[in-house]
Amino acid sequence: MNSFLRNFVVVLILIPVFFLSTGITEVFAGFGITPPYVRNTSLTRLSVYEQQILLVRSDANTAQIAEVSVDAPEIQDWIQVVEGDVIKLPEGVQKVPMTVRVTVPKDADFRDYQGAIRIRTLPDGDAVTSGAVNISLGALVDIDLSVIDREIKDFRVRKISVEDLNEGHKLFWLYFPGKIRFDMLLENTGNVNVSPSRVEFRIFDRTGKVLLEETSNISKIETITPYGTETVTAELPTRLEAGGYIARYTIYNGDEVKQEGDLSLNILPAGTLQLGGFGFFGLSLAHKISVLLPVFAIMIASIYVWQARRRSKAKKR
Amino acid sequence: MSYNNEEFPQYVKTAGKITVVTAVIGVFVFIAAFMVDVGTQELQKVSAQQATTTLTVLNTPPEFTVFPYEVPESSVTNPTNSGDDIRWEAVGTDSNGAPYFLLLCSTNATPTAVAAADSGSLGTEPPECGIGAIQWGVSTSTVSGELAFVATTTTEAAPFSESNDWFAWVCDDDPFNPRCNTVSSQGDVATGSSPFIVNSRPVLSAAGNDGPVDPGDILAFLSTSTDPDTEGGEDNIFITVCSSNVTYDTVTNTCSDSISSSTVGVTANASSTRTIGIPTRDQTYGAFAYVYDQHGHNASANPIDVSFEVANVAPFVLGAEIELYGELGVGTDLTLSVPGGETPSSTLNFTVQDNNSCQTAALGDEIASYDFSVFRSGVGTTTCDTTSANYNPNNCYPSGVGQTVWNYTCTQVSTCAGPTQTDIDFTCDFPLWFVADPTDNGANTPAFLEIQNWTAAVRGVDDDGAIGQLSTTSNPRELVSFAAIDILAEDIAYEAVAPGEDTGSINASSTAQNVGNTGLDQEVLGEDMCEGFTPSIDCESSATSTIPADQQEFNAATFTYGAGTNISSTTASEVELNIPKTTATTSASWQQGITYWGIAVPASITLAGSYTGLNTFTAVVAEALDW
């Protein structure tokens, strides 16, 4: 082979590799996920737990897709990505939610389980640079689950608020207290229905120095299903007159204080707000007895008279 | 008949009585002698004679038919305030039907009845008190049997003292024998008898208050005051404070604009208190102090200006009224969603309250501004104290750093309706850099971060520059882990390789940047390379035109081909780059790790041309130790 032919062959062979080479260009087109995990250590059999994960990117100028693959051999069947295996990342949309649903079968062993979900972004429409080893970005979702055989009653307080209320009022001798409505946005972090066991208010004057009243909820607080996040309301009676106060609230889960803090409490003159107050349930024990006692007395008297008449008729016969 | 009273006081007392007695005795002697010593003959003889006798029937003095009494009563329990009139009433009856006078004296020295000029002038000459007695008063001439009264205006000067005896007489002014009744009267009505009591005014020397005080605190009005009265024990004194000096009623001792009044009397230095309401503006308030005694008698120095000052207090924020949440909405944790950038739209809501109200006396804004900071709890407010000095995008965002550095925007979302309102609501929208420390319970979150959370501290500043205490939210949030990666190239730039050759020690490289808030590792996955590769169309299995993915090797350090790890097209491989968490926001300082690449082109490749492939770089949260 003469030198010309030899050089030609070498060049011909090298051509494909040259095409694979391009200059390094600095780009900032990052991709990430938050949170990078699906974690729950209080699952029980038949639990259904959902975790939302945000897929985010710094450059949303082009449409992309995210391919999702679950890599969790032991629990592959438990894991479902609600949006499917391919999630569109439309042009102009910088973050897209992805929901991972974990459904624990009824025969799951009580132990820990691990796995991963891999997410890979790809250009929508196969738009890759020809002749190059392209780069795609992805992220790994760590799966860390525990199935347990005991109940966990726990919750997290995400938000609290209290509305203005009417002061209490008298009807004859009965005093119907004002009703404090204390709203709590709670996340059930346990595995059974849960609600605060008790909510207490210590109500001070506006300086926060003089304790005027202590009260706690007198009706049951609605429960929240496992892993759910809902607003529930505690209703507390107050006998304070109209005015502005500072209330120190405490939210209990059993003996544990889940949250406490100070907030303003505005009690308005009776009838200012179109809100229902406490009915019979809000009366003091003495007032309840004062209502119930005559009722019971009448009932007993009626029964006695009825019985007496029956006996009388029986004798006549 | 007149006597020298001073030399013959006894005569004064018996004057007229001896005359009458002597005359009566004379008549009895005459009758007796006549009946015992004279016989019938003489009587018959006498009866025949004319006998002339002379008898003067003397004037009789009027007498009380209703004993004197005070109107109203003047007693220890119900004295006559100095300056008020005291009045006595009584009914006297003169057997002659002559008019009479009611005379009130300070002692029982026998008064002097004064004769009228003639019987046609009866009732024109009032009697006078006896020697040494103070004459409290004498009535006008009063028809016998009708009510007579005497009144005099009391003073705190002589002849009045606190307790004053009185003796009453009724006298006539008979032109020939003017007389007063024999025995004086001090009244027989328990509550209206002698003495009468003159209640002196309390003495108010000075008054003031212990202000300035804060709204909600107790303001005391103080006085230097006494009461000179001692009858029945020292008098109690009281104080009433009015906001003006025009509405005080001296009779009821009240005012329509009352600020404060004492409810319990004291014998000296009367004082009263008032709890300053909330809200109350910080300014000076007019006040006037009035001191009075237990009988309602007012001090001469009333009123004294006791204007008080309500102090300016700093605004405050309640912990449960600081609400912090992330871009996903109310109640959510803080999240990051911009790799290598600032994630906008986290929210901080708070309410600033001021017990001086939200409105100044000049109708301006009492709550002038606010400071706040958002920070990881472990940093604390001592460090992240809202000033710019400790700004750190990893863990401390103080408002003092300014919006050019931390681009937050705040808006007042409620208005101040008037001086009865104390609070103003604000909402702030703020960004967080991608380096903000996570505090959630991610599998690899360092324990020292996992036990913390993110919180916010807020304080208000008022129009006078008073700065409140920093309050932290009662409801802190977690900041969620954010695993994010960027590769500083669009492709992997291999050198030219001939079939049957590899890149040897010449490595291509890919630089991974940590653009999230965790430590970062990397997984890689490759695709076979061919001319017509697309993500959705795999390369056909061809020894001559497809370069398998596993012909690529990678390593965390430079290497000679053959010493690296082959990339898989099916199983992701982790590259232990151990990229620490990025802590700086400028791209030049972002943490990064380099993956080195090599490739071998199989000798069977005969197709020259463009080979296209795709390698995937997957962000993996690094182990906690590698952050």
Image (cartoon, rainbow, N blue to C red):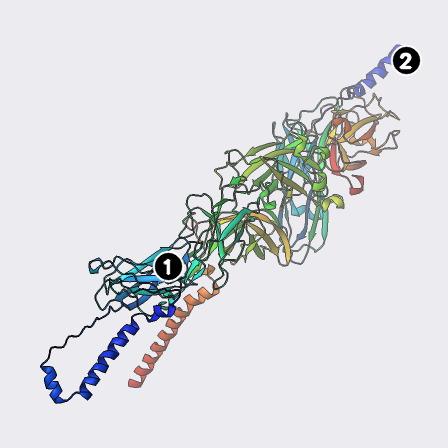
**Place of residue B82 in the rendered image (x, y in percent of width and height, measured from the top left):** 42, 54
Q: Residues within 10 Å of mark 1 (few under 14, many from 20)?
A: many
Same-chain check, marks 1 and 2: no
Is residue B37 left or right of B387 when viewed as pictured? left
Q: Quadrant of residue B367?
A: top right
Say which of A286 and B583 sits in front: A286
Left or right: where A241 falls relative to A250:
left
> Which mark, by number, is residue A1?
2
Subunit of label 2: A
Instruction: Using the image, tell me which numbered label, if any, was put on residue B339.
Output: none
Residue to which mark 1 is pinned: B135
Residue B479 image point, x, y percent: 67, 40
CA neighbours of label 2 inside 10 A, class few (<14), some (14 to 19), many (20+): few
Q: Nearer the viewer, residue A284 or B262?
A: B262
The C terminus of chain B lies in quadrant: top right
Where residue A120 sits, quadrant-wise, is top right
Type of residue at label 1? Gln
- Residue type pointed to by label 2: Met
